[in-house]
Image (cartoon, rainbow, N blue to C red):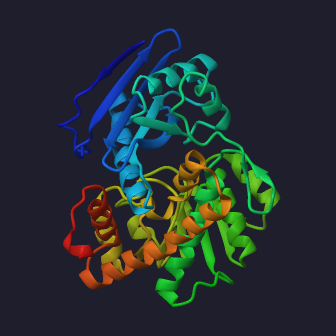
Amino acid sequence: MIIEEVDVSGHEDFANHEKVMKCFDKSSGLLAYIAIHNLNLGPALGGCRIWPYLSEADAITDVLRLSKGMTYKSALANLALGGGKAVIIADPKTMKTESLIRAMGRFVESLNGQYITAEDSGTNVEDLKLMSEETSFIAGVQDKKLSDGSEATGDPSPATAYGVFVGIKASLKQKYTNDSLDGIRVAVQGVGNVGRNLSKMLVDAGASVMVSDTYQPALDRITNELDVSVVANEDIVQQKVDVYSPCALGGALNMNTLVEIQAPIVAGAANNQLSNQGAGDYLFHKGIIYAPDYVINTGGIIDIFYEREGYDHKKVMNHIDGIGATLADIFRLSVEQKASTQLMADRLAESRFLGELRDAVA
């Protein structure tokens, strides 16, 4: 196994990252990167993604953006955590093996606790449990008792979905001064674990939900479980709905899709939804309320944090409910400062993890 630090200081997505490590393990085929963005508030926590990147350059771009997002996410969730992320270059459907997962666990262990890994796209609780046989720096694997006495796995996706649900209600209140979902039309793009759980919450609350996904089995499952309508993935952004909720991979809001958005609210679970800062400015000037992704999708990391500190489901849910208040503050600052919600969220987060009081939050 070869582990080495790589210099990415010249990369356009470098944001004063503390370190980026590369690992190649010939015997298992593991080729992976771990990026640690910031450790000011605590150890870096972030998921391990397995994805068939077209190049190592694409993987580096993703790990840099995702790790930075985790720093901002933890700061705005008021957690004693920094930001990090891991990516494995592989197809999770055909290349994920026990030896590869174990090798990744040893890679995580090599960082001596600076980075704690968890579930992400392409990994699941069983993968993390296997990694935990090679490293103790794992989160999101413990079975938990819920407030109603039932038990759940370490899977953080239901908590992430609940946080997005809370965020959608806060966004509706900002737009309509009423957070009722009765009769509200929502377009959910991506119905994996988070999107499917979110859709159920929305339907149960009285919303009319349409969904899309590139993976047919995911669509088959949700249509068997819920009363939702299906549209083509390339058409979901164009739907005339109240809320567009991107819940798949990043980059959903780019210069191709921004002009197609019909919804007055964008509020979803996907990480790195904005292709760049200009996308956030565009939404602001178009009058579309945007719930910054790393604010609205913090439910999962909140859930994982409490797992490590001593799990109390009631405390977890109360903490996740605070996402609504955080978004309300960001919406208020956006109006007052006449600037995008993304910029206001960035400044609020930076005031916490950099220890600096910015003008926007003075």
Vertical placement of residue 308 versus 195, above or below: above
Taking the image as shown, residue 282 lies to the left or right of residue 208, namely: left
Residue 71, above or below 7: below
Q: Check the picture and name the quadrant holding the N terminus.
A: top left
Q: Residue furthest top?
A: 27
Q: Which image quadrant: the C terminus?
A: bottom left
Residue at 48% in and 19% down: 30
* Residue 230 makes an appearance in the image: no
Q: How far from the left and from the top, in percent, is residue 341?
A: 34, 72
Q: Is residue 151 left or right of residue 134?
A: right
Residue 147, position in %: x, y?
74, 62
Pick out the residue farthest to the front.
Answer: 310
x then y, percent, for residue 349: 33, 62
Q: Position of residue 106 (x, y in %)?
A: 49, 20
Q: Residue at x 61, y 23 (%)?
A: 133
From the viewer's perspective, tell me whether residue 184 is left or right of residue 244: right
Q: Nearer the viewer, residue 259 or 56?
A: 56
Question: Can residue 90 be seen by looking at this rendering?
Answer: yes
Residue at the extreme bottom: 177
Res 201 → quadrant: bottom right
The residue located at (55%, 57%) in the rendering is: 247
The residue at 41%/60% (across/down) is: 253
Left or right for 282, reference 211: left
When the figure is inspected, residue 156 is found, relative to residue 111, above or below; the finding is below
